[in-house]
Image (spheres, rainbow, N blue to C red):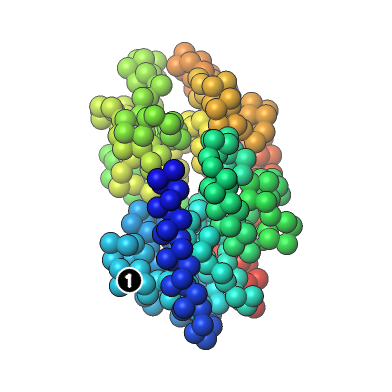
């Protein structure tokens, strides 16, 4: 209850300041509130090509992008009060707003009718429930539920790459068809740039000193509640190395996870920090994951995937999954290290399934997603 009270006070103060700035004339300006940054960066690049917009980025403390192509970049944090106040001013007086995450301050932003706030969600797809379908919010007080809805109703537009995600966003955020922009997520443009993908693959393999004959496997699980400080890896790398000496594993943890015990060797390396996920996907030959959204982008490469879900019953019970997991995902579903070894050794993959999955989840992603988005909103 203390947290709810503090949030209420914070948003009341924020709303008061926003309302004062809201009296000022509305400017033909674009403000991008960034938590993750990759979609935001694509939008900035395209805005510079296609428009004369003045571009201001408000960076969450968690965002590590520099955004040098923007006209202004501010630290949107109470620890930087002057920049924070400037950020509120820009939010209140700009015609175009982009966000890439759940932003609680939106609950206090009474945008004018001429303003368009566009959600560039940080994932191209979703496996687990979130938003209003999140199972964990049932125990939250009514004030929290009201706040969630206040935030979601500020999503004038939500960008998607597929009809499946359009349905999920409408369910998660209580939106309507007119709130959905089917242009493809901006970050998917990277995967269609074959020259850049090949370049990054060669650069990273060289940097990591991976022998050409090695088959590279990217293991990228999502986080588990209670394991954010240290993730307990379900993979037995000693067993895997004995069975698969010609393979090389890259371990990429979810950004929310602080660390896990991975002893770097000639067989496995922890690449959780300092490496971009899209470059790791380009470098790898096979993906192993669980309930992460990574397959929705990895499928564009039309490369094999394995789904290691030894806790699927518990996860579905606690978190909830949007679909029949084993039927929906485009690859073998395994629960033990032995089964994983068998799949890899015997090459039990059907790339036609990956192709079908890609067509389903990336039907509006074609390498021109950012351009289509900017043309739709600005022209």
220 and 76: which is toward the camera: 76
Residue located 49% across and 32% down the image: 289
Residue sitting farthest toward the right: 177
How far from the left and from the top, in percent, is residue 265? 25, 28
Q: Quadrant of the N terminus?
A: top left
How far from the left and from the top, in percent, is residue 335? 51, 18
6 and 178: which is toward the camera: 6
Q: Is residue 31 left or right of residue 84?
A: right
Q: Is residue 160 left or right of residue 228?
A: right
Instruction: Assign a secondary structure to mark 1.
Output: helix
Location of residue 244 (image quadrant): top left
Location of residue 247 (image quadrant): top left
**Taking 156 as reference, is 280 above or below it?**
above
How far from the left and from the top, in percent, is residue 130? 57, 42
Location of residue 212 (image quadrant): top left
Residue located 63% across and 67% down the image: 372
Residue located 40% across and 21% down the image: 235
Q: How many marks?
A: 1
106 and 144: which is toward the camera: 144
Dot 1, crowdedness within 10 Å: few (<14), some or many (≥20)? Answer: some
**Taking 88 as reference, is 319 above or below it?**
above
Residue located 61% across and 33% down the image: 321
Q: Quadrant of the C terminus?
A: bottom right
How far from the left and from the top, in percent, is residue 155? 60, 61
Task: Look at the image and tell me whether residue 279 can be seen.
Answer: no
Residue tagged 1: 83
């Amino acid at each position: 209850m203390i947290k709810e009270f503090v949030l209420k006070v914070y948003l009341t103060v924020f709303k008061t300041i926003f309302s004062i700035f809201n009296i000022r004339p509305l400017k033909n300006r674009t403000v991008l509130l960034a938590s993750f940054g990759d979609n935001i960066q694509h939008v900035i690049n395209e805005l510079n090509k296609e428009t004369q917009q003045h571009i201001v980025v408000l960076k969450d403390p968690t965002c590590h992008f520099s955004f040098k192509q923007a006209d202004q970049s501010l630290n949107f944090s109470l620890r930087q009060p002057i920049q924070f106040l400037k950020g509120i001013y820009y939010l209140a007086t700009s015609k175009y707003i982009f966000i890439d995450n759940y932003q609680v301050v939106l609950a206090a932003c009474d945008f004018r009718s001429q303003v368009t706030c566009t959600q560039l969600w940080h994932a191209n797809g979703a496996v687990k429930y979130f938003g209003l379908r999140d199972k964990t919010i049932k125990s939250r007080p009514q004030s929290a539920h009201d706040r969630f809805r206040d935030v979601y109703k500020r999503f004038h537009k939500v960008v998607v790459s597929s009809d499946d995600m359009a349905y999920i966003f409408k369910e998660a955020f209580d939106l309507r068809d007119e709130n959905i922009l089917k242009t493809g997520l901006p970050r998917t443009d990277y995967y269609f740039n074959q020259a850049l993908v090949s370049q990054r693959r060669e650069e990273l393999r060289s940097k990591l000193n991976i022998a050409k004959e090695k088959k590279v496997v990217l293991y990228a699980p999502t986080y588990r509640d209670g394991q954010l400080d240290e993730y307990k890896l379900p993979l037995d790398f000693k067993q895997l190395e004995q069975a698969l000496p010609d393979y090389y594993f890259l371990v990429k943890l979810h950004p929310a996870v602080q660390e896990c015990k991975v002893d770097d060797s000639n067989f496995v390396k922890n690449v959780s920090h300092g490496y971009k996920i899209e470059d790791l996907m380009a470098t790898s030959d096979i993906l192993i994951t669980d309930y992460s959204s990574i397959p929705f982008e990895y499928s564009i490469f039309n490369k094999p995937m394995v789904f290691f879900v030894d806790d699927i019953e518990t996860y579905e019970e606690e978190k909830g999954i949007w679909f029949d997991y084993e039927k929906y995902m485009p690859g073998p579903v395994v629960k033990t290290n032995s089964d994983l070894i068998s799949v890899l050794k015997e090459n039990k993959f059907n790339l036609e399934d990956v192709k079908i999955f890609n067509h389903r989840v990336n039907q509006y992603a074609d390498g021109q997603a950012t351009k289509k988005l900017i043309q739709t909103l600005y022209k």
